[in-house]
């Protein structure tokens, strides 16, 4: 699970300062949240701190399923390949 930064981020840097696990990075392409490091503040706060501190409301929960399996076609392709 992770949070994500929306395009309307003002790049103020407040979220970077409050992240308890240092999962928010300022890069040349803008501010981003690491999917690998973000814990949604589990164990640190009741909810993601960055979401509530963001003055522009640009931080949201990331999709719980980053990819959607193509059910059925994967099984047919597997059978076609392996018989």
Image (cartoon, rainbow, N blue to C red):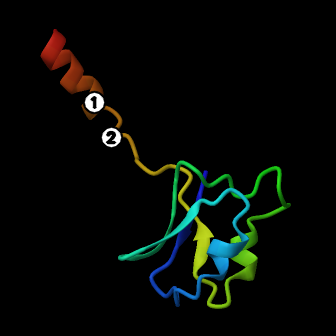
Quarter-of-image position of residue 79: top left
69 or 17, which lies in front?
17
Give the residue at x 76% y 70%.
Answer: 49
User: Is the residue 23 above or below the residue 11 in the image?
Assistant: above
Q: How many marks?
A: 2
User: Is the residue 60 above or below the residue 53 in the image?
Assistant: above
Q: Can you give x and y, in whole percent of width and height, for residue 53 in the image?
A: 74, 81
| 3 on left or right of 52 | left
Q: Can you give x and y, in whole percent of width and height, for residue 64 in the image?
A: 56, 52
Label at residue 18: none
Q: Can you give x and y, in whole percent of width and height, for residue 33 in the image?
A: 53, 64
User: Is the residue 12 above or below the residue 60 in the image?
Assistant: below
Q: Secondary structure at mark 2?
A: loop
Which quadrant of the figure contains the C terminus? top left
| 43 on left or right of 74 | right
Q: Which residue is mark 2?
A: 70
How busy is the neighbourhood of tag 2: few (under 14 within 10 Å), some, or many (20 plus)? Answer: few
Give the residue at x 79% y 64%.
Answer: 47
In the image, farthest residue toward the top:
83
Quarter-of-image position of residue 74: top left
How busy is the neighbourhood of tag 1: few (under 14 within 10 Å), some, or many (20 plus)? Answer: few
Q: Which residue is mark 1?
A: 74
Give the residue at x 64% y 85%.
Answer: 57
Is mark 1 in CB contact (under 8 Å) with mark 2?
yes
Q: CA distance from mark 1 to mark 2?
A: 6 Å
Q: Can you give x and y, in whole percent of width and height, for residue 37 in the image?
A: 58, 51
Q: Secondary structure at mark 1?
A: helix
Give the residue at x 45% y 82%.
Answer: 7
């Amino acid at each position: 699970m992770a949070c994500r930064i929306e395009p309307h981020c003002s790049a103020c840097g407040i979220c970077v300062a409050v992240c308890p696990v240092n999962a928010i990075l300022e890069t040349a392409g803008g501010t981003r949240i690491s999917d690998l490091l973000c814990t949604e503040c589990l164990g640190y706060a009741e909810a993601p701190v960055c979401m509530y501190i963001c003055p522009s409301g640009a931080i949201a929960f990331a999709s719980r399923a980053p990819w959607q399996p193509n059910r059925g076609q994967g099984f047919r392709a597997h059978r076609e390949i392996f018989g």
